[in-house]
Image: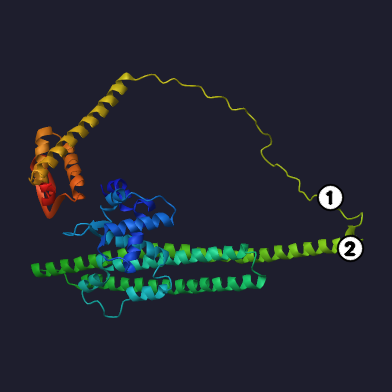
Amino acid sequence: MINEELYHQYDLLLPSRYEGGFLVLALHEKISRKQIPEYFTDSDIRVTLEELAARFNQSVWQTDRIMKTLNYFFIKNVPDQFGKYYLSDYARRVVKLIENKLENPYKNYPLRETFQKYFTIRTGEFKTIHDLEIRFGRDFVSPYKNVIENHLDGLQDELQEAHHKLSDILISEQLTAIQMVHQFVLVFNRFGERAEDIGNAIHTKDRFLVNLHEETDKFYQYIMESQTPENDEEIEQINKLRADWAIASEIYNDLSSFFESVDQKLALIHKQILYATEKLLELQENFSTRSNFRLAIKRILNKTLDQAAYEKGDVAFSAAFPLKNIPNDKVQFFYPDYYFFIVQKAGQLIEILRDEAYEQEQKQIIENQSRQAEIINEWLLSALDELAAGKEILLDHWINRVYSSENSIDLALYAGFELVQRTVNEKDYQVDIQNSLETLTDMKLQLWKIRITSRPSATLS
């Protein structure tokens, strides 16, 4: 069900750049720089959208449509402060995730120190199973695992960036040979540092697993050293020792499995480092190609000077100098042996017969939808008339009224949504939402307690 929900609400969880994504980034940036307050207004949103439209050469986006999308997860209304909003915690976490991906905080932090900080066992540290569980239990060690995974992710990004630098150096036409070698050395120094760091981290990790295995074996040793139980108290004691050993084994298996995945990632990173050494061969080929090209240019220049003479203010070449020959290379087709040039045949027009049953079915669906829209509009106008007359509307009672009359859950809910949508942004109406649930008994649904009233100025007019 969770996966299905992700598919259905993906656009709300991660809106596209022009449907609110850029707006969230811009608002977060302005709040960070103190350009707008934490509780910003409609005016701040509209000004930001106009700035984004000018910056990316786009037409001004529809504020209402974007806000309708972002109101689900990214931008929330400030309670009791009409027209003010704030970025949700989810929005801030999404922006932080993007920032950490572009600028990983663990990029310049040694991997070995990370392992030593979170995965080190000191002698005599664990007296009971609770000590071991609090330190390395699945729930307690989860943040440490995330740090290691983020660190490895940043390391892969760094090495990939270094690969791109090597490729850029090789194809650069402005750099001299000495400059190319100097920049290659700088990049490969980084590769060497990372390779050494990975080796040290693997050594630290292996030592930790050995120590953890020894700690786990202690709890099994307690079972082996215990005597055969003879009474209920001793049976309870042996069962407790077995439970402790089961917990210790689960902790070891969990961390062992985690470090297996770490080993796989480190192996891939190590292959990236080894693959980078192939760039040295490309550098050698680059130097060789440049050298051959220069030699060829020199030979052409020498031959040209030998065959040229200065006559009457112009350069003249001897008859032996090839002036009109065009260098070419014969093209050989190794496969295929022969070619087919077949004229494409014109497609046949397929006559689609009229399906009257399907036509009537679609017409009926359209008529039902139109009738449903008319009914919702009638109920909406009736509710607005009640508000204009000074009455208040409790949304749960009103939806029950619509359901009792029309006998349709969908129609009742759509009518309720339309009523809230129509009144919440209108200055003539007051919509109060309380954080308590009201049960719609007939429909077996629950809804926030929502009270809609007409403002006094609107009632007098």
- Whole-percent x and y of residue 191? 52, 70
**Amino acid at dot 2:** Asp
Q: Report how far apart the C-alphas of labels 2 and 1 lie in the structure.
A: 18 Å
Left or right of 251 in this view: 432 = left
Residue at the (55%, 24%) spot, across then down? 346
Label whose residue precedes the other's in the sequence (2 or 1): 2
- The vertical placement of 460 against 92, above or below, is above
Helix, strand or loop under label 1: loop
Snapshot quadrant of residue 88: bottom left
Left or right of 208 in this view: 232 = left
Residue 257: in sight, yes or no? no
Q: Which mark is residue 306?
A: 2
Residue at the (20%, 59%) spot, across then down? 78
Residue behind mark 1? 324
Residue at the (35%, 60%) spot, across then down? 25
Circle 1 Cα neighbour tier, 10 Å, few/some/many (<14 / 14–19 / ≥20): few
